[in-house]
Each structure stands twice: as structure tokens, then as C-alpha cells.
Amino acid sequence: MRLVTENKPILIITYYWPPSGGSGVQRWLKFVKFFPQYGITPIVFTPADPHFEIKDPSLLADIPSETEILHFPIWEPYQLVDRVKRFFGDRKKGKTQSIAQPEGFLGFIRANFFIPDPRVFWVKPSVHFLKDFIQEHKIEKIVTTGPPHSVHLIGLRLKKEVPNLKWLADFRDPWTTWGFLLGMRPTKLALAIHKKLEQRVLHSADAVTTVSPFYGRQLGGLASRRVNVFTNGFDVSDFKDLRHSWTPSFVIRHVGILHPACDYVPFLKVLSRWILKNSLQESVEVRFTGHVHDRFATFVQEDAVLKRVVKVESAVDHSELIRLYGQTSAVVLLLTGYKDAEGFLPGKLFEYLATGLPLIAVGPSQGDAAQVLKETQAGMMADSNDEQAIEQNIENAYSLWKQKKAFIPMPESAMVFSRERIAARMSEYLKSL
């Protein structure tokens, strides 16, 4: 097993790692990419052959060749889940729920019997392996990143086994206040267990970080401690080959998973009415690139205008997504329907900034994402109940397309969200622990 020894090694424990796809994997992938130039040698501990619903092999190119990756076996209860599905008659291909986005009975099982999540079975064997690895290789600092929040339990136990270990717990999403968890209907007992584990993590970690100011205040309030914010961002080099071309149709694109909690109705209703009012059925295309759920498809099919202009496309590799941005007139960000949406700063927001495309944003006008748009002069967040503002956002993007100006050079103020600059800040923070 080879270790780079020029810099102090830091062990990063993460469930999501390439070839896993989606925005969740990119946060610590990009940190790992840039850490070596800032004096940190990252060592990544991640599952061997985990269950990934979204794969993106193109992200493997971002891993520095000298980075040590420790792939450790994991057991996940997917066979059991499949049996439960079959028992309850869920046999339709393409219709089965995933354990990552469960609803109904399956969600109830997950929230109450797999605490904190189905990856909990990875905790004990990982701690057993890592305790020896840390002592053998003189590792002084570790990072855990969740969700899945089981990963934080690995850090919690390692901290108990090796008290001098410095531990940073990074929350990409909340834990017990997370709408995703609460939507699965945990019982009072289960939620109490979740809260107890959360408190132990928040109080035992030497440092806690998260992705947005709102989440920072929320987690800090739960633990009565400071929680530092390191937002997601964009990697400038990912967009070096982006070539914009004017499209004959006005192409609006939404990228990534359309979560069941997302309330797409306000945007789509206004869009449908705007298209009909301006007789643009032949001129507008709306592309949803990524996973959507059945209710969305049904809603679209029941609207005569949307049925004509909306198209759902399969998820694509990140490298292919960059090419698609070049064939897009405007991008859409939907932050409506989520619990605590004020704190939602998804990775796609920052990628949208890097494209230079007009941004149609619908969500809390006083939230963290709205503040980012204001600081970067990238657009205005329209509240979901403000139909006039939503239509104005659409009209503004359409006007730029009509003028063949559907590309806005990114202002220097947006560069504060470059992955490299954020990695530089995180490097200094880790060194200070």
C-alpha cells in the first residue's frame, strides 16, 4: 500500500466516490483534486462496490494519480429491500422505489429500522480496519462527510478509540431536521435515537462544517457550537471546453434529480401559460436532464402545452453535460417545496453560474441561494407564489435568447465559489485543527 509522504496525510471517509455520479460526490472529490497543491495529502476511504443509483465514470479523471484510495467491503440491505418490495407486490419494472428516495412503507422501514441509514452495517468493520490503519500510518486528522450519516458514526467511534485524533464532520445535508428523513415518518422513539446520535457527533467532532449559512446556524444551534460554512462551487477547468451556440429554439434545461419533494408546479404552470399567451409552442423546448418521478410525468402529460414542449432525458456523464450546456438557452433552478429551502445551496446552482447561461430561479427570495444570485449578479430568485416574478424571469431569459445574447460572462465576484479557492480555504482550516 503506497502513501505519499511529502505532506501530512489526512484521511477522508466518504460513501460517495467515483464512479458514483451526482452532485454529492463532487464536493470531496474536488477537495481531493486540489488539496495536494495546498500541502495536504488526501487518503480516501470508501466502499468497495457500493450500490450507486447514478454512475458517472468521467469523474474518475479528477482523482489525482498519487491519491491513495482504500476500497473497503460493504454490506447493504438491498436484497432485503427487494424482498419487501416483492412481498408487497411492487414488481413493475421502472416503477420500484429506490432506497435512496423511499416513500410509504419502504420509507417507514428505512427511517425506523436502519438508523441512521442503511449503510450502518459498514460502521463496525470500517472502524476495526481504520483503527489499525490510522495508528500504523500515523494519521493525525480525519474527515467524515454525510449523508449517509452512518459515515459520521465511523468518525465518532474512531475518535473514542484514538482520542488524540482530530476529526472534522462535514454535513452536506442536515440530519434530524432534514426534510428527507422527516418525510419517511420516523416514530418518536426512532427520531429520539437519531437525535442522540446527532448530538454525540456534533459534540465529539473537533470541527463541524456544512454547505450553507442557514444549515450552519441550524446545526450550530443544535450543538451550541460554531459550525463553519464551506459552500459547494464550480471547477473552472470543467468548463474549459464549453462552447455556446445559439439554438433555433428557446431551450430551457433543468439538470439533475427532480426530487419528489420539489414543487415544480408553480414554475410549470406559469411557463405553460406564458407559452400559450405568446403562441410559442413551436419555439420553446424544456429539457429535464436527469431522474424525475412518476408524478411529474403525469402532471406534464395532463397539460396540453407542457406535453408538447417538455422532454425528459436520461442522466448523462458530467463531461457530456458540459456539451449540453452549450446547446442550452437558459437553465432553471427549482428550490420550492423543500423543508428549510432557505438553506438549500445545491451544487447545480454553482455549475449554472459557471455556464454563463441566463438562470430562471424559483425559490425562497430571502434564502441563501437568493443571496448567491444577488452577490454574483446572476439573476433574481422568484418566490413560488409570485407568478409575476416567475414570468419575468422567463421573459428576461427569452429576451436574451431573441437578441442572441444567451451567454453572460461570469463576473469576478462569482470566482469566490471556484472549487480551487474553496479547497484552499478548507486546506488552511484543516491544517489549523
Image (cartoon, helix red, strand yellow):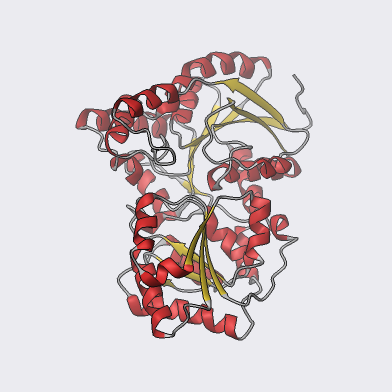
Quadrant (top left, top right, bottom left, bottom right) of the N terminus: top right
Q: Nearer the viewer, residue 400 or 206?
A: 400
On the rendered structure, is 156 left or right of 230? left
Q: Give the total of numbered labels.
A: 0
Q: Nearer the viewer, residue 4 or 316?
A: 316
Q: Which residue corresponds to the image point at 75% horizontal and 39% vertical from the top-left?
A: 64
Q: Which residue corresponds to the image point at 40% horizontal and 50% vertical from the top-left?
A: 293
Residue 420 seen from this side: no
Please determine whether, in this image, residue 183 is positioned above or below residue 79.
below
Please determine whether, in this image, residue 421 is positioned above or below residue 305.
above
Please determine whether, in this image, residue 201 is positioned above or below residue 389.
above
Q: Which residue corresponds to the image point at 63% horizontal and 63% vertical from the top-left?
A: 325
Residue 377: name its quadrant: bottom right
Image position, residue 302 (x, y; %): 33, 64
On the rendered structure, is 320 left or right of 255? right
Image position, residue 315 (x, y; %): 56, 50
Residue 424 seen from this side: yes
Quadrant (top left, top right, bottom left, bottom right) of the C terminus: top right
Q: Which residue corresponds to the image point at 63% horizontal and 41% vertical from the top-left?
A: 29
Image position, residue 14 (x, y; %): 55, 33
Name of the residue lying farthest toward the left: 188
Residue 47: name its quadrant: top right
Image position, residue 346 (x, y; %): 49, 54
